[in-house]
Structures are given as structure tokens and as C-alpha cells.
Image: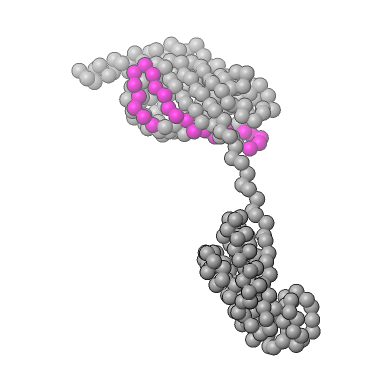
Amino acid sequence: MRKTFQAMIIAAAVGAAAIGFAGNANAEPGGVKVGTLTCDVASGWGFIFGSSRDLHCTFSPDKGTPEHYTGTISKFGVDIGYTDGGVLVWAVFAPSSDIGPEALDGDYVGATANATVGVGLGANALIGGGSKSIALQPLSIEGNTGLNVAAGVGAISLHAEAAAPPPPPPPPVKTFIVFFDFDRSDLTASAVDVITEAVRVAKANGFVKVMITGHTDTVGSDTYNMALSLDRAKSVKDEMVRQGMDGSGIAVDGKSFHDPLVSTGPDVKEPQNRRAVIDLGG
């Protein structure tokens, strides 16, 4: 008895769909095809005399940048059973190929007819958007499973999502220079003052990546000065960590005497070359 009653309801629904569908089954939307609209449809229980589903859509124009829309799709008619979420794809037609941004924003209406028992049978175009000049012609329905019988007038509302603002430019690199006494890697009082200011600026501006590069003058061998320059960079890092910086974001390097601030010959005790450079960025 239950199966017979269900079959009677389905037959009535399909009959109503046929009446609504026959008048415009052969109608084609006018204008120029300007792209496709692909919508993910939320799943949910159907109910008699109406149903609605949330939409998350992407309009892919034949020319230009894709646009994103949210909205709902409603069907007023007979709706029986459960339909899983699926993907609906429409061809988008407009009076001309030159449509502006967010042209699909608006409400769409049109006669629909659909009967599904494991597979969709079809639907009519919807008209709406800017100046009611946009037509949506169904291309395919994927993932439409379960028993769902719908007939009547369909209505879709689309709302353009605001484009995400471009990411902010990375903050400019800020540089501080710490100077050292001859042949030393320990910090002077003035060096600590410079590091304290660097830490303050880093915290105030959200700098999480720090590069510290140590340097030497030209007195001594390259091997010795390479180790000394690296020790100077490590001394600066240790002080920054002591003042609250995250050591995992601080990298150190040594250049020996190969990148002087002041060019000199060999064996010259140039104070400006005995330094560590702090670069804040990121």
C-alpha cells in the first residue's frame, strides 16, 4: 500500500512537471554565452510543497577573472525524499559579451520541471541578474542521488562575494648595526642599546624573521675571522632572545672580512668593519 501511494504521488508530480515543461522545453536563451556558473548545492531533507538549498557558486567568464557568489535555490512544487549535495552547472547567456563585474548578482525565476529517480531528467532556463538580462541554462547535474521529485516554478538568488583584498605588502626590511671592539665578540653597552632598539622595532611591527650577519676587519687569517664573525652574530642573537625574541626565527651567518663596510688593505684595524648587521623582515 505504501509503495502504491508513493507511486501515485510521483506520477502526479511528473504529470505536473510535464505540463509546465512542455510549453518551453524547446526554448533557448537569447544573447551570447559569456561563461559558466558552477554551484555546490548543500544537501538536506526535501519536503512537500517546497524545498531550498544553499548555493556556493563560481562564475567562470569566457573573458576575465572568476567571480564567487553565494545564495539559495528554491523549488516550489512537489518535493519528496532526500537529495545529497551535488554540483549544478549552468551556461550563462547575456545580451552581449561585454558584461560588468558582479553582473550575475540578483534573483532568477523561471518554470522548472525535474523528476529524478537516480538520474536527473532536466530543467528550464532561469532569467534574472542585472536588468533581468542574464539567462542560466542548465548543463548538468552531478551527484543528484536518492529519490527527489520536483515540479513548479524555481527561484534562485545569487549574491556576489566581496573580492578578497590583496595581501598587504611585506614590511620593509629594517637594518641595525652593532659594532665590536678589536678581536672581541662580547657586547659593549652601546651595542646592547642598539639591540634593544632593534627588539623594540621588531615587536612593534610584527617582525618574526631576523637575519644577523657578522663581519670583521682584515687583521688575521680568513679562517680565524670567519669564526669570529659568526661568534659576533651569535652574541647578538643571544641578546635578542634574552630580550624576548623567538630564537627559532633568528638566523645567523658570518662573512669574515669579505664584505667590508669600509674597503681597506690587509691587516687594517678598521672599527666600522668590526660589526654585526641585524636585518628585520617578514
Is residue 71 something one can see in this rendering?
Answer: yes
- State the residue at coordinates (36%, 29%): 44
Residue that lies at the very extreme toward the front in this rendered image: 189
- State the residue at coordinates (79%, 78%): 263
Q: Quadrant of residue 190?
A: bottom right
Q: In this rendered view, identify the residue nearer to me: 105 or 126.
A: 105
Span highlighted in magenta in the image: 43-65
Using residue 133 as the reference point, say whether residue 6 is left or right of it.
Answer: left
- State the residue at coordinates (47%, 19%): 154
Q: In this rendered view, identify the residue nearer to me: 259 or 140.
A: 259
- 23 is higher (above) or lower (below) than 70: above
- 143 is higher (above) or lower (below) than 134: below
Using residue 259 as the reference point, say whether residue 43 is left or right of it.
Answer: left
Quadrant where the N terminus sits is top left
- x and y, in percent, of residue 97 in the image: 68, 27
- 168 is higher (above) or lower (below) than 79: below
Is residue 256 something one can see in this rendering?
Answer: no
Query: Residue 29 magenta-drawn?
Result: no
Using residue 251 as the reference point, say whether residue 122 is left or right of it.
Answer: left
Residue that lies at the very extreme toward the left in this rendered image: 1
Query: Residue 60 magenta-drawn?
Result: yes
Q: In this rendered view, identify the residue nearer to me: 239 or 7.
A: 239
- x and y, in percent, of residue 260 in the image: 74, 76
- State the residue at coordinates (46%, 15%): 153
- x and y, in percent, of residue 29 in the image: 58, 20
Q: In this rendered view, identify the residue nearer to me: 211 or 188.
A: 188
Quadrant where the C terminus sits is bottom right
Q: How many marks?
A: 0
Q: Quadrant of residue 234?
A: bottom right
- x and y, in percent, of residue 96 in the image: 68, 24
